Amino acid sequence: DAMVIQNPRYQVTQFGKPVTLSCSQTLNHNVMYWYQQKSSQAPKLLFHYYDKDFNNEADTPDNFQSRRPNTSFCFLDIRSPGLGDAAMYLCATSSGRASEQYFGPGTRLTVT
Amino acid sequence: DQQVKQNSPSLSVQEGRISILNCDYTNSMFDYFLWYKKYPAEGPTFLISISSIKDKNEDGRFTVFLNKSAKHLSLHIVPSQPGDSAVYFCAASGGQGAQKLVFGQGTRLTINP
């Protein structure tokens, strides 16, 4: 089945210790997104890639970086996690404009 | 600046009855609207969408209505089933940010047996 896969599902990191979350897709979609969701809030878009073009949201902290080495994979790097970065991180894909986004199961990040 | 608003944080409905979830938006450039369902510890699942050229779209038990003049959309679920208990997010896209979705805050729907 075509899908969006996120690894790991749960990640614990220490304050200030870099962490990488990964996302892969078998849908062959052009666009990949990273969202941050804190409990009871709307998913907040951090950035997205249209093919290799990177699009950062204006209010995404510099602490958050992303890489997309190929169509199938996209990574979220948090360079120096703070306690406020504890959240669910959702990866999504879409085929482009005016189309639904398909979400992975998310990675729950805990910062100790 | 909340461009998409779901004013009801929670809704409780009897099994078998109709559930109506509401969503308002402010950006007149939005031309595509979606509803997602989210269970705890899972990613949102796409439910149904509607383009601004339509005012209704139906898929089984789910119907989405769009009122462009009021900048309002609603999701109707009938009949409601216990498995429908989840958080529902509406989302919108359009204009310069056409590849991006703007989400509402979500409404927690509980279906009571």
Image (tube, coloured by chain):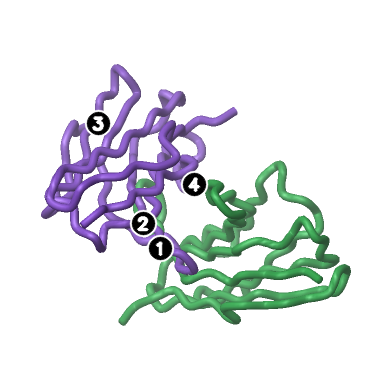
Chain colours: A green, B purple
Q: Nearer the viewer, residue A106 or A21?
A: A106
Q: Are marks 1 and 2 in contact (CB under 8 Å)?
A: yes
Q: Which residue is mark 3?
A: B66
Query: Which kind of residue does numbered mark 2 sit on?
Result: Ala
Tag 4: residue type?
A: Lys
Q: Secondary structure at mark 2?
A: strand
Mark 2 lies on residue: B86
Mark 2 vs 3, N-terminal side: 3
Describe residue A56's horizontal placement relative to residue A15 as left or right: left
- Element class at badge 1: loop
Q: Residues within 10 Å of mark 2 (few under 14, many from 20)?
A: some
**Circles 4 and 2 on the same subunit:** yes
Tell me if mark 3 has few (under 14), some (14-19) or many (20+) residues whose alpha carbon lies within 10 angstroms of its own: many
Residue A15 spot, x, y in % from top left: 86, 69
Question: Nearer the observer, disc 3 or disc 4?
Answer: 3
Classify 10 Å Cα crowding around label 4: few (below 14), some (14-19), many (20 and above).
many
- Return the residue found at the far top: B69
Assess whether mark 2 and mark 4 are in contact (beta carbons under 8 angstroms): no
Q: CA distance from mark 1 to mark 2?
A: 5 Å
> Where residue A61 appears, x then y in whole percent?
77, 51
Q: Nearer the viewer, residue B15 or B9?
A: B15
Report the residue at 49% width, 42% height from top: B105
Residue drawn at x 52%, y 63% as measured from the top left: A32
- Of callouts 3 and 1, which one flags the residue occurring earlier in the amino acid sequence? 1
